[in-house]
Image (cartoon, rainbow, N blue to C red):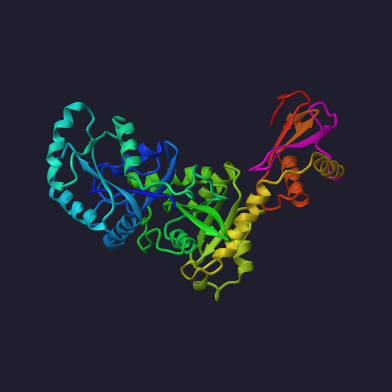
Amino acid sequence: MIPQVVIVGRPNVGKSSLFNWLIEKRIAIEDPTAGVTRDRLVQRIELDGRVIELVDTGGMGFDDPDGLTAQIDAQIESGLAHAAVILFLVDVRAGLVAADQEVARRVRRSGTPVLLVANKADSPGFDSGAADFAPLGYGQPLLVSARQHRNRGPLVDAILEHLPEADDDDPTTAELPEMKLAMVGRRNVGKSTFVNALAREERVITSPIAGTTRDSIDVRFEVDGKGFLAIDTPGLRRAKSRTSDLDFYAFHRAQRSIRRADVVLLFFDATEPIGKVDKQLAETITEESKPVVFVVNKWDLYAADVKKREWTQYLRDTFRTMPWAPVAFVTATQSRNVKATIDKAQRLYRQSHTRVPTPRLNDVLREVVEANKPPADTRGRPVRLYFATQVEVGPPTIVISASAPKSVSEPYKRYLINAFHKRLPYSEVPIKLLVRGKKAGEGET
């Protein structure tokens, strides 16, 4: 079992900064506003050959203005219950405060090994403040600065010293998931509820309050014995309605999650019309050439009023550049059709990573060219398409050698892509098409 190292502390001691610093990625939101982190953020990493899961948590003792205090606290308690080591973080600049004493009491009840870490010690001049934390009963704190990258090595060594002995079954590398799935969509379309259905636990906080999810949250789950990664993302608002830094973070984290994903699940609320945010997300998915499943959630609230065929046609009429995308109708609150949706995503993943032999690809090319020849070049001469080859997967990328690549129009390229969709095993995923001259790089389009 992979040990979890859980970061806890009162609000604004720099837990998210420390989390990002240790994983060497900017995953958690770093913001001076108290209470930004609500869910548990988990990242699987290697520290000097030992695989751990590092966990960021919300601030202990924070009274959430949206009434989510109990849910945030439950996430913290779940982190403590599963921890192999607890990083108890304090702020050396602020010194010991009453809230630190309360954190210490809660941590002590867990019975888990605790490493006291004093953050924001940007230079040795702050080290004298370490003595302030003696009353907590955890000895001399390890002084670090996540912002100034101070003492990361000693912190990693201390974490490794506090870990339990490795089992023979423990992985020696942070194995990759079978597939990464990004859940994107507007606010309150049910992405987090869907993720909880996959994880079969209350892994992320759900509520009717718009904007409950703030970070992009990685959640590992298993289907048919295979490991997957779900990336839950914050719900997005229209650009003119983005009024805070959190709205800005949400937009960019959704974009990054789409780039990270193998397959994207774009969520819609069955009771709401498609909006501008949905179209913006679809544009990003298209730009990144990602396979996508259109997921219509809350179907139990709307099924009596409209048929699936009509909603599917509504999606086709709205997203005309994505006719290949399959549609799933789900009720996440009841886990209805959740497994079937993951099966669809697996099918798209396999299609996106399929390689078609060159002879088969050229047979199809000759067939579609004979049915509809390309337009003439600028001198009125017929354009010849000599040869096609697949050069990449994820997405399938096809390169065609042509006599006059710049004369192959965009409508004709779309014709070729549509033909490939119909005749090759990529029927539900995007295809990248490049047209080049006979010499490498000549006239690439």
**Between 16 and 426, which is closer to the camera in this rendering?**
16
**Whether residue 67 can be seen here:** yes
Prevailing secondary structure class for the magenta stretch in the rendered image: loop
Query: Would you say residue 62 is visible in this rendering?
Result: no
Q: Is residue 380 magenta?
A: yes
Quadrant in which residue 443 is drawn: top right
Please name whichever residue, 273 or 363, is drawn nearer the observer in this view of the structure.
Answer: 363
Please tell me which residue is depicted at 84% across the width and 32% down the height of the picture.
384
Residue drawn at point x = 81 percent, y = 34 percent: 387
Range covered by the magenta-colored residues: 371-397
Figure check: 395 above or below 105: above
| Picture residue at 51% right of the left edge, 48% below the top | 280
Q: Position of residue 105 (x, y in %)?
A: 18, 55
Task: Name the side, left or right, on which 248 lies relative to 223.
Answer: left
Image location of residue 19, percent across then percent down: 34, 42
Residue 392 lies in magenta, yes or no? yes
> In which quadrant is the C terminus drawn?
top right
Image position, residue 382 (x, y; %): 85, 32
* 443 displayed left or right of 206: right
Q: Viewer-proximal residue, 100 or 66? A: 100
Picture coordinates of residue 257 (x, y %)? 48, 46
Total marks shown come to 0
